[in-house]
Image (tube, helix red, strand yellow):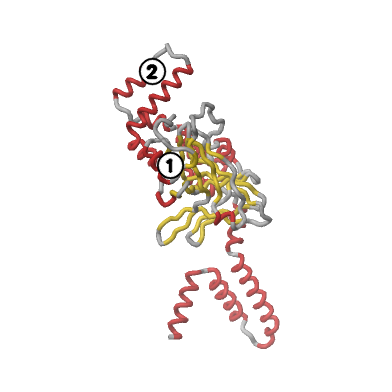
Amino acid sequence: MNYEDDLRMRAVLSNRDIMEAMNKGAIFIAPFNEENLQPSGYNLTPTYFVYSTKKKRLLPLIKENNSVYVMIDRNDTVLIRTREAIAVSDNITGNFDSKLRNTSVGFGHISTTLDPGWEGQLLIPYNNPTNKKLRFDIEQNVSGKIKYNAFVTVTFNHMNSAATKISDNTSGRWDILDNTIYRHNSWLKRNKVGVLEEIADKLKDRDKYGLQNYILDNINDKEKEEYYSLENNSTYSDEEYEIEKKELLTKFLKTHVRKIRIIYEEEMLDSIDIVNRYIEAKQEFLPFRYKIMQYIKKHIYKIIGILLAIVAIIIIYNVYKNDGVNEKTIVGSVAVFCIYILCPTVIKVIEKVFVDKMK
């Protein structure tokens, strides 16, 4: 849709320009958080959808210490689906830039653009060019409040005239989504992929339901009559019809922009929930061997400690077995030591009793 008659601005949009464009319906950002609005751009945050182009699969989530993150392999490029959906008019474009906090730990710079007329959530390519795995944070619970990792900033540019070519890029990349449904699943759950298919279909339906439909859902009866009259007018050529239709939708949007912004925000929040539910459901389908490896990685130091303790006890037992050392005492010592290492709750109880006695 074309807003060049309304927006008296050129080049990069400031925070004030972005707000003006949003108030006039030239830019939609949903969900919108004023904390993410920058002097000359807007910070974008990730969903749980992080797809490895190297492994051809979704990266598994790691949840610990009030954080949710993924580990990105060396020399791997991932596609990260943003929480935010963006819709822009035909004369607004944009660029994406990495945040310094991420590039400073080794992640590469982003080089991609936002096309005029774009609408939907975004898939942002993110590269790890280093020779080691890098942690990519998604969200963190800080004092009961979820803080999302602002990993990329989009800057908006207002062009001198509206673009007439339609972008060949589409939001969502359903081909990638479909590919993840059937790959890297436990053989025990292969007959239950219908759960994943159902959630994926909901996401596709949401992606297809564009801004035009939100506009048409919220116009009054007189405006609907005007729109259907245009639809049924056979005197227009295809090109003339598209021009008239765009102008009519633009008029409707200007009239109902505040209401449509609220509805768009609600729908995109629901879209985030669908994406994250799909990823969490997919986690349940991971092969059992992966879950075992994840447990080992998470508790590696505890496991090593237990093994060393057992080895030490065996050595002590063999050394002192002829000196009257009670076998049950040794086995009991090993058991207590293992429980102390493996069970955080037991650790706290033991430490509390010990501290109380010291007092």
Q: Tell me which corner region of the image, top left, top right, bottom left or bottom right, holds residue 235.
A: top left
Residue under pointer 2: 230
Q: Residue at x 53, y 35 (%)?
A: 115
The correct choice, above or below, for 57 with respect to 328 in the image is: above
Is residue 292 in view from this perspective?
A: no
| Residue 66 place in picture, x, y as percent | 47, 60
Q: Residue at x 39, y 28 (%)?
A: 250
In the displayed structure image, the side of residue 52 where residue 260 appears, left or right: left
Residue under pointer 1: 29
Is residue 304 in view from this perspective?
A: yes
Q: Quadrant of the N terminus?
A: top left
| Residue 269 place in picture, x, y as percent | 41, 43
Crowding at label 1, few (<14), some or many (≥20) Cα neighbours within 10 Å? many
Secondary structure state at the residue bearing disc 2? helix
Q: Residue at x 58, y 35 (%)?
A: 175
In the displayed structure image, the side of residue 107 where residue 273 appears, left or right: left
